[in-house]
Image: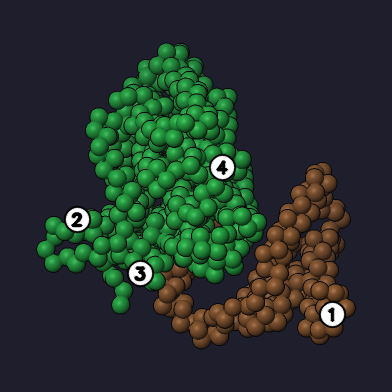
Chain colours: A green, B brown
Amino acid sequence: MFDYHALAPELILGVTLLAVLAVDLVLPDRLKYLAGVTALVGMVAAVFPLLTMAFCDSIAGCVDGGTRSMFGGSYVVDDFALVLKALFLVSGVVSLLLSVGYLESDDYYQGEFYFLILASVTGAVVMASARDLITIFIGLELVSAPAFLLAGWRKGDLRGNEASLKFFLTGVLATAVMLFGMSLVYGLTGEITFAGIASQSAALDLGPEPAFVMGVVFVLIGFAFKVSAVPFHFWAPDTYQGAPIPVAAYLSVGSKAAGFVGLLVICYQAFAAVPEVWGPILWILAAASMTVGNLGALKQTNIVRLLGYSSIAHGGFILVPFAMAASYDSVGLSDAFFGSITYLLIYAFMNLGAFAVVIVGAAKAKSGEIADWAGMARYAPATAGLLAMFFFALAGIPPLAGWFAKFVMFRSVIGVFESGWAIAIAVIAAVNAVIALYYYARIVKSVYMDDVPIAVPQAEAAAIRTAPSLVLAIAITAAVVVVVGFFPQVLAFFGEAARGF
Amino acid sequence: MQFTDWIADARNIVFLVIALAMVGAAVMVVTSRNVIHAALMLVVALAGSAALFLMLGAEFVAWTMVLVYIGAVVVLFLFGIMITRAPTKADPVRLDHKHRWPALLVALGTFAAMATVTTLAFEDAALPDGVARAGDIGDVLFDRFVIPFEVVSFVLLAALIGGIVLARKDPE
């Protein structure tokens, strides 16, 4: 007997997927946005069972299943899964809000676009509960396969084709490597669930076994590609720049968060017995991602590309709490987990907001080049103000949400400060935070202080109206960024719920 | 184990023949200048891997290889070549790249590492009794692994729909 309450979000999403296709089939061209509305309604509806499960105690007639473990431990809906499912659904909703106005303005295929975004979000929702190798792998495929296609949605555009093809080829290679790693892990432990792998690898003392180490490394490489951690980041800036901007926003938040969740859960649960294997690898990935991402961002002239590099750098920050995992006890590990997940939650809202403002700005300045954005505050003061807000949030300036993300990240490394490696990663992170501030502030300065380029028709740009869905998306993300900045305990509460796992 | 002992077992001779045929076919896939020949060589390589699965007693996987990879994937390649009217004659330019030597080095290094590590780990491990019958696989698929099974269908649906959009010629 299935626990239908626990599976309700997935069932709702599955039905909505089919509904979007059916609705798209009967709609005339000018009403295609209704397919997007259908997808939106489905995602919002899928949040409700999450709430009823989270607050099961206070609802009459609700059977509290505790951690709802199904299919022999392969599929678990605990507090951690609930928080992340909510994150994926909200970032999916915001990405859809970004897309509706954007797609209307050009002749894109709309219904299929919404279908693919929804399919990718469904994959992420499945991943949050997946606790065995097969489920997490297939969930990850459902996240990535639509993303490959969405990246190439601008069919006539050469950059769009390059974006899609590059993303597809590197992604498929990463998948193959990861799958081979998984087969080694399965072959040596004979177990498919994370709990089984952890207990078997401890019982058989597989830590020094070369084949097991190779399996772990291959699995990590696969996920590192998905989260575009350096040195597996080459596809990210090109793909973000070539893809439609809402897709870039989704890639940098939704599918990236899904990759992180997979990576952290697999390290934390399946490979719990061998932190000495994956700890140093995550250290290198974190340090390299922060440094290369930020140095790359310094010399970018295109704003989407810059956000691409900055999201690589933020990926590094997210990994920092886990970098010292090898020397943690179980309390330290759960602190690290708390740090990474809180950073991920806050980053998702900051980055979606930044992309939303970039969509508005790119429509007004008719360009994604930073030079063309100079002096935007003269003709679009609201856009410029929001841009400054989200960029300073990403840089980590109080009282905007970013400071709290950086704070929990540093706090979780400081716990093991006696180790030279911990000091090293903390110093690298601090230096990188400063570099990041420089390039974010440079754009804000240019928007406020530089002269408007002659080519930009100011009166015309000021008259461009922003789609209501886009305004709503900016309002949601801006509210979260401000509220969390002042009252960090709101999101910390979610992070805390995830820690219990 | 001595090579003479090893070769005395008839099963090892069968394995050797199949493996050599697979390696030869795989090399031809990459070196052949004619794209049709490459696809047909791929059939040989895949059939070889199906045969290896049969030798291990995994009939279901073996027949899946034949049905899905040979029957569907390679045939789709051939259809694709036919429909897009790609040149079916030998390609005048060899597929080559200026980084061929570093690439070869990386490939050989990866092969050596993987071969050593897997041989060391699994050399004389006995085959465990697992799910082998197609019926057992069906039971597991619709019970324990029903979620990934359903999710796969969405992956395919998404790939199909997105593929149509990208491949379709836009009406102007």
Q: Which residue is mark 1?
A: B5
The residue sitting at the left extreme is A60
Q: Quadrant of residue B123?
A: bottom right
Q: Which residue sits at x=47%, y=54%?
A: A272
Height in image: B69 above or below B29?
below
Amino acid type of the residue tagged 3 in the rendering? Met
Question: Crowding at label 3, few (<14), some or many (≥20) Cα neighbours within 10 Å?
Answer: some
**Distance (Cα) linking label 4 and label 1:** 44 Å
Amino acid type of the residue tagged 1 in the rendering? Asp
Q: Which residue is mark 2?
A: A55
Q: Which residue sits at x=51%, y=63%?
A: A203
| In-front residue for pair A410/A480 | A410
**Distance (Cα) linking label 2 and label 3:** 20 Å
* Of pointers 4 and 3, the one earlier in the residue sequence: 3
Q: Is residue A398 left or right of residue A272?
A: left
In front of the other: label 4 or label 3?
A: 4
Q: Secondary structure at mark 2?
A: loop
